[in-house]
């Protein structure tokens, strides 16, 4: 069994800066970390590796500095690391990102399970994981809090809902996105750190993948950030006092006056 974990390197700061020309994040000179939700995906892959004797591969699309995130994943017990890196990928939206990652997964070949974090801390869209599944025409289960059973053909998982969870059985291969309730990520061991420091990281550019150039990067992204701004601070407003019935009448009259 081969497990692929898709991770993202995100800024380790709340002071996010935006390029005013491209409306994309400025990552140069900003400390970066593995996306927090992806740490749970890594941990789950390592646990399955230890339990089933599976092979765990970590995949990341990003700039050269994302190699640091891949080495951290290796130090936690992942077997292999692949970085998809090319200026042609710069400015990708969630559609272009999931397209590129899906092509990298096709290049990897056979796999049984793809694990992604629920969402990225810098975008919060929760779209890339499901997008990968759509491009690969795979079944997907989102918000997974527990893998109950898994073998060579099927998996049964618990997927969180607003009111609890539901149990879903799915054939393999499948893509799942995981939430923080699924496990507690481990810390890297000294042996793991030493192995990761000297490990070879495979780097694929656009030329190494069977991709359509028009589907890559900013030019291949069907969605664009047209404008970014800080909403004005709220001001004014009215304060009402009185009994609930009286307050309701005042509020209804206020809304009528605004509409008319």
Image (tube, rainbow, N blue to C red):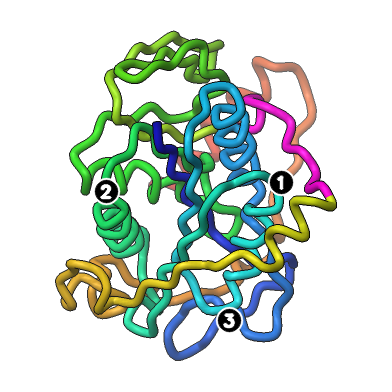
Residue 44: where, in percent of width, then height? 59, 32
Q: CA distance from mark 1 to mark 3?
A: 40 Å
Q: Image point 64% across, 57% down: which residue?
A: 34
Depth check, front residue: 198 or 4? 198
Q: Image point 18% across, 39% down: which residue?
A: 137
Left or right of 122 on screen, residue 59: left
Left or right of 109 on screen, residue 167: right
**Residue 9 is covered by the magenta coloring:** no
- Residue matched to label 2: 109
Residue range of the region highlighted in magenta in the rendering: 179-189
- Secondary element at tag 3: loop
Residue 65 vs 154, above or below: the answer is: below
- Residue matched to label 3: 26
Depth check, front residue: 68 or 176? 68
- Secondary element at tag 2: loop
- Point out the tag, 1 or 3, that comes first from the N-terminus: 3
Q: Nearer the viewer, mark 1 or mark 2?
A: 2
Residue 205 vs 138, above or below: the answer is: below
Residue 42: where, in percent of width, then height? 59, 42
Crowding at mark 1 (Cα within 10 Å: few <14, some 14-19, many 20+):
few
Residue 92: where, in percent of width, then height? 36, 70
- Secondary element at tag 1: loop
- Residue matched to label 1: 238
Crowding at mark 3 (Cα within 10 Å: few <14, some 14-19, many 20+):
some
Q: Nearer the viewer, mark 2 or mark 3?
A: 2
Crowding at mark 2 (Cα within 10 Å: few <14, some 14-19, many 20+):
few
Q: Nearer the viewer, mark 1 or mark 3?
A: 3
- Point out the tag, 2 or 3, that comes first from the N-terminus: 3
Q: CA distance from mark 2 to mark 3?
A: 33 Å
Q: Image point 71% across, 46% down: which residue?
A: 238
Classify residue 4 by image quadrant. Answer: top left
**Residue 183 is covered by the magenta coloring:** yes
């Amino acid at each position: 069994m081969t497990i692929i974990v898709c991770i993202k390197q995100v800024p380790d700061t709340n002071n996010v800066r935006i390029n005013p020309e491209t409306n994309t994040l400025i990552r140069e000179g900003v400390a970066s970390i593995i996306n927090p939700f992806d740490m749970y995906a890594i941990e789950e892959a390592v646990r399955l590796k230890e339990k089933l004797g599976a092979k765990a591969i970590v995949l990341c699309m990003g700039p050269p500095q994302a190699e640091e995130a891949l080495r951290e994943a290796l130090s936690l017990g992942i077997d292999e690391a692949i970085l998809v890196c090319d200026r042609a990928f710069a400015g990708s939206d969630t559609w272009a990102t999931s397209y590129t990652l899906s092509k990298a997964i096709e290049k990897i070949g056979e796999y049984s399970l793809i694990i992604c974090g629920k969402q990225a801390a810098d975008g919060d869209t929760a779209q890339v994981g499901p997008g990968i599944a759509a491009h690969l025409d795979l079944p997907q289960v989102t918000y997974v809090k527990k893998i109950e059973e898994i073998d060579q053909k099927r998996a049964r998982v618990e997927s969180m809902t607003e009111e609890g969870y539901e149990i879903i059985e799915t054939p393999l291969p499948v893509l799942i996105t995981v939430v923080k309730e699924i496990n507690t990520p481990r810390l890297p061991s000294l042996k793991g750190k030493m192995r990761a420091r000297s490990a070879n990281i495979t780097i694929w550019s656009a030329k190494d993948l069977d991709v359509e150039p028009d589907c890559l990067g900013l030019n291949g992204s069907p969605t664009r950030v047209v404008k970014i701004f800080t909403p004005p601070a709220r001001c004014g407003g009215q304060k009402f006092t009185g009994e609930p019935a009286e307050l309701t009448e005042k509020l209804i009259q206020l809304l009528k006056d605004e509409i008319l």
